[in-house]
C-alpha cells in the first residue's frame, strides 16, 4: 500500500496526504532504529520519555487518541505511527488492533515513546473465542479498559430482547475482566438509540449491567447524530461514562475534526465529573487528512480540558 492508496478512506474524497513520503520514511526509519536502540529516539518535546510520563496530566485531563483514526498508517508501520502520535503531543492511546505485533512489543513501543494505552477495542467474537488471551494481552500492554466497539447487524437482532441478552453477557464478561483488574466497557453508535418494543437499547445496556462490572464509552458524535444530548445521559446515569470518543459532527451530518463542527463540546466537558469521565479519545472515522485531524483534535481537547 503506497501513500496515494492510503489517501482514500471510505467515501471521503481524497486530497494530498499531509504526511509526505519523505516524512513517513523518516518516521519509519527512526522508529525502527528505536526498536533496537530506544535511547536514540528523538521527540519534539523536551525531556526523556520518563520525564514526559511524570509530567502527564491527571487521567481526565490527558488527551487521548483512538488509533482507528490512523488505521491505514498503522498497517504500514506501528512504530512510526506511535512516534508520530507522541510527537503531536498525545499521551494516551486506545488501540483498535495490534497489527501483527505482540502485546509485549506494543508495550515496549509505548514505553519508548512515553505513551500509555488505558483502553483497547475488542470485538465481541474475540471475547467469545479467546477470552484468556485477550486478558493476558491487556495485562501485558497495560489496558485498564476493554471495550466492545461494534455489533454486526446479526448481533443486533430485531427485538429489544437481543440487548437484554447482551446485557447479561456483558455482566459475565465484565466479571471475568474485573477479576484481573480490568473494566469492561461498551461503545455506542447511533443504532443503540433506535427504540425497540418501547425501549432504547442503550438504556437497557446501562440499566441492566452492573455498574461495578461494565462502564460505557459514549461516542459523542453518534449520540448527537442520533438526536440525543449527551448531558441528558450524564444526568440520567451519573458516573457511568468513564470513556468518551471526542468526535465532531459537520453541518451535513458527516464527520468533522474536533472543534470545527457543530457539537457544543464546552458544555459537554463542563459535565465531565457528572459523567464519571476518566479518559477522552479523539477520533474521526473517516478523514481525508489524518495528520491535520489528529493535530486539530489534540489542540481542541487540550484547550477544552483547560477551560
Image: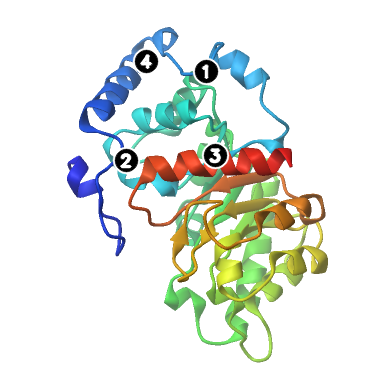
Residue 79 on image: x %, y %: 36, 28
Mark 1 is surrounded, within 10 Å at the Cα level, by few (under 14), some (14 to 19) or many (20 or more) other residues, namely: few
From the image, tell me which residue sits under label 2: 73
Q: Earlier in the sequence, mark 2 or mark 4?
A: 4
Whether residue 71 is visible here, answered yes or no, is: yes
Q: Residue at x 63, y 46 (%)?
A: 280
- In the rendered view, does 88 fall on the left or right side of 271? left
- Quadrant in the picture for residue 64: top right
Question: Which image quarter is the C terminus in?
Answer: top right
Query: Does residue 97 show up?
Result: no
Is the residue marked by circle 2 packed among few (<14), some (14-19), or many (20+) residues within 10 Å? Answer: many
For marks 2 and 3, the one nearer the N-term is: 2
Which quadrant holds residue 27? top left
Residue holding disc 4: 34
Task: Tell me the distance, in whole angstroms, between the alpha carbons under discs 2 and 1.
Answer: 22 Å
Residue at the spot of label 3: 298
How far, Cα to Cα, is label 3 from label 4?
25 Å
Q: Which residue is mark 1?
A: 45
Amino acid at each position: 500500500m503506497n501513500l496515494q492508496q492510503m489517501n482514500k478512506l471510505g467515501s471521503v474524497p481524497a486530497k494530498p496526504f499531509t504526511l509526505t513520503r519523505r516524512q513517513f520514511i523518516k518516521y519509519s526509519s527512526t522508529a525502527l532504529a528505536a526498536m533496537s536502540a530506544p535511547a536514540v529516539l528523538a521527540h519534539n518535546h523536551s525531556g526523556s520519555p520518563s520525564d514526559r510520563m511524570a509530567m502527564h496530566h491527571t487521567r481526565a485531563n490527558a488527551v487521548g487518541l483512538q488509533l482507528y483514526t490512523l488505521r491505514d498508517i498503522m498497517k504500514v508501520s506501528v512504530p512510526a505511527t506511535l512516534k508520530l502520535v507522541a510527537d503531536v503531543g498525545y499521551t494516551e492511546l486506545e488501540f483498535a488492533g495490534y497489527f501483527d505485533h505482540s502485546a509485549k512489543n506494543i508495550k515496549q513501543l509505548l514505553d519508548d515513546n512515553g505513551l500509555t494505552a488505558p483502553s483497547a477495542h475488542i470485538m465481541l467474537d474475540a471475547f467469545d473465542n479467546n477470552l484468556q488471551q485477550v486478558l493476558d494481552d491487556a495485562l501485558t500492554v497495560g489496558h485498564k479498559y476493554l471495550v466492545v466497539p461494534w455489533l454486526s447487524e446479526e448481533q443486533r437482532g430485531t427485538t429489544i430482547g437481543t440487548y437484554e441478552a447482551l446485557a447479561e453477557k456483558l455482566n459475565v464478561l465484565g466479571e471475568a475482566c474485573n477479576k484481573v483488574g480490568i473494566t469492561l466497557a461498551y461503545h455506542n453508535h447511533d443504532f443503540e438509540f433506535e427504540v425497540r418494543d418501547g425501549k432504547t437499547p442503550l438504556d437497557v445496556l446501562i440499566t441492566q449491567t452492573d455498574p461495578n462490572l461494565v462502564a460505557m464509552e459514549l461516542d459523542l458524535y453518534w449520540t448527537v447524530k442520533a438526536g440525543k444530548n449527551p448531558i441528558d445521559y450524564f444526568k440520567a446515569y451519573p458516573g457511568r461514562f468513564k470513556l468518551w470518543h471526542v468526535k465532531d459532527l459537520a453541518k451535513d451530518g458527516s464527520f468533522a475534526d474536533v472543534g470545527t463542527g457543530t457539537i457544543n463540546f464546552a458544555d459537554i466537558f463542563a459535565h465531565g465529573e457528572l459523567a464519571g469521565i476518566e479518559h477522552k479519545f479523539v477520533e474521526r472515522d473517516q478523514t481525508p487528512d489524518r495528520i491535520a485531524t489528529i493535530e486539530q483534535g489534540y489542540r481542541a481537547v487540550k484547550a477544552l480540558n483547560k477551560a
